[in-house]
């Protein structure tokens, strides 16, 4: 029979030290769990260990980490637990109550002892949530004494804290990314929005000034859009805008930026002198779109270039918009006076 309390004090200190370091400095969840679980196994003499996380989307356990198991044994071990809702590890997650001294058998048929500990953290309000299960294994019979039980619970708490911390961090990062995407894109079409394209145009004009190069700005306006909305409804109008946006996204170059700036207006920022060429490619793509009801989808465009048509970003947009508003020939590309085809 193993002396379960031998070196418990030093074991507790090593677990505390490892857990604190993992929570404070580990860069990812796998590393943090490995440090915590290895310290717990060393302190208790466990030969094997595993961490299962609760997948809330599928309401199932997912194996995150194993210790002291061969690859082929891991696969069988995972299948045994995940596929069996009556397994003690599953019950530990469901009931949030641990099992100490569970008898079992290894792959070679020898007797083993296991401890299954739920990983519980504070949830909303006073409710606790189970985020997974930590299980340790010993060969043969192993009695878990009071001090070792306290140590095992501490290791489980550290593992639970690691999972909760990294999940919270990941959710915060995903939300920040989503908020940034919302702030920079048009929700209807997924293109850049007015704020984004204005910033891009300022940067491109500044670069062109430094390098003595050109920047083209093209404005696209969907012909008869108000009439379409009035006749067929906003849903049909939104469908047209998405179709036009798809053509724009597929027609521009990697260095170009395309945005919807409101209503039925789209803006293209094209570094260099290829703005007219890209605009023509867009017009060709629009011409291949299917009609929406009785409405044939067409757009008109105006192109202005720096430095010929404006000394800064605002002047370029004003020049292109004036040319587009003053155009009498719809479904065409209007070039601001001074730009070359």
Image: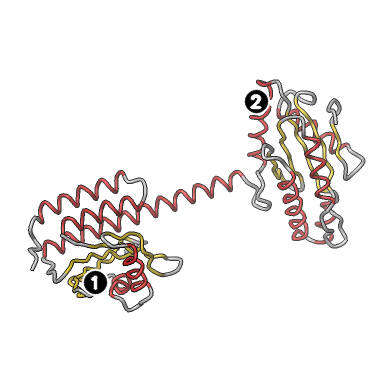
Q: Looking at the image, which residue sits at the far right?
A: 328
Residue 51 at x, y = what percent?
A: 31, 62
Residues at discs 1 and 2 in contact (Cβ within 8 Å): no
Residue 215 at x, y = what percent?
A: 73, 29
Label 2 SS:
helix
Please state if 308 lies on the left or on the right of 49 as rendered.
Answer: right
What number is the disc on residue 106?
1
Picture quarter with the C terminus: top right
Placement of 121 over or under 174, stated as above or below: below
Question: Residue drawn at (71%, 47%), measured in percent from left and top?
Answer: 249
What number is the disc on residue 331?
none
Question: Residue drawn at (64%, 29%), measured in percent from left and top?
Answer: 203
Residue 155 at x, y = what percent?
A: 22, 58
What is the quadrant of residue 91 in the picture?
bottom left
Q: Nearer the viewer, residue 283 or 157?
A: 283
> Badge 1, how many Cα within 10 Å: few under 14, some, many 20+?
some
Q: Which of 84 and 245 is in front in this view?
A: 84
Dot 1 or dot 2, earlier in sequence? 1
What is the quadrant of residue 46 in the picture?
bottom left
> Badge 2, how many Cα within 10 Å: few under 14, some, many 20+?
some
Q: Looking at the image, which residue sits at the far front?
A: 108
Placement of 264 over or under 51, stated as above or below: above
The answer for how far apart the CA atoms under marks 1 and 2 are is 67 Å
Label 1 SS:
loop
Q: Name the residue under label 2.
A: 207
Q: Nearer the viewer, residue 171 or 102?
A: 102
Residue 47 at x, y = what percent?
A: 20, 62
Q: Looking at the image, which residue sits at the far bottom?
A: 86
């Amino acid at each position: 029979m193993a002396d379960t309390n031998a070196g418990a004090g030093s074991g507790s200190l090593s677990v505390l030290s490892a857990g604190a370091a993992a929570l404070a400095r580990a860069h990812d969840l796998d590393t943090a769990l490995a440090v915590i679980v290895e310290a717990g196994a060393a302190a208790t003499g466990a030969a094997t260990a595993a961490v299962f996380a609760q997948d809330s989307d599928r309401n199932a356990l997912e194996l995150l980490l194993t210790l002291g198991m061969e690859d082929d044994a891991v696969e069988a071990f995972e299948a045994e637990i995940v596929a069996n809702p009556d397994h003690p590890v599953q019950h530990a997650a469901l009931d949030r109550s641990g099992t100490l001294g569970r008898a079992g058998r290894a792959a070679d048929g020898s007797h083993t002892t296991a401890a299954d500990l739920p990983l519980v953290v504070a949830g909303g309000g006073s409710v606790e949530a189970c985020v997974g299960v930590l299980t340790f294994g010993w060969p043969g019979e192993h009695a878990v004494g009071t001090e070792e039980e306290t140590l095992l619970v501490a290791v489980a708490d550290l593992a639970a804290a690691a999972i909760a911390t990294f999940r919270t961090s990941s959710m915060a990062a995903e939300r920040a990314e989503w908020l940034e995407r919302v702030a920079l894109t048009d929700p209807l079409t997924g293109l850049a929005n007015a704020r984004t394209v204005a910033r891009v145009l300022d940067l491109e004009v500044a670069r062109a000034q430094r390098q003595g190069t050109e920047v083209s700005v093209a404005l696209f306006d969907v012909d008869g859009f108000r009439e379409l909305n009035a006749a067929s409804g906003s849903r049909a109008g939104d469908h047209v805008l998405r179709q036009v946006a798809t053509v724009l996204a597929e027609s521009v170059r990697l260095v170009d930026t395309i945005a919807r700036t409101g209503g039925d207006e789209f803006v293209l920022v094209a570094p260099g002198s290829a703005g007219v060429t890209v605009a023509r490619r867009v017009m060709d793509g629009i011409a291949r779109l299917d009609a929406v009801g009785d409405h044939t989808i067409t757009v008109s465009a105006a192109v202005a270039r720096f430095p010929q048509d404006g000394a800064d970003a605002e002047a370029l947009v004003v020049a292109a918009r004036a040319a587009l508003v003053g155009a009498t020939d719809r479904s065409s590309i209007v070039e601001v006076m001074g730009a070359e085809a």
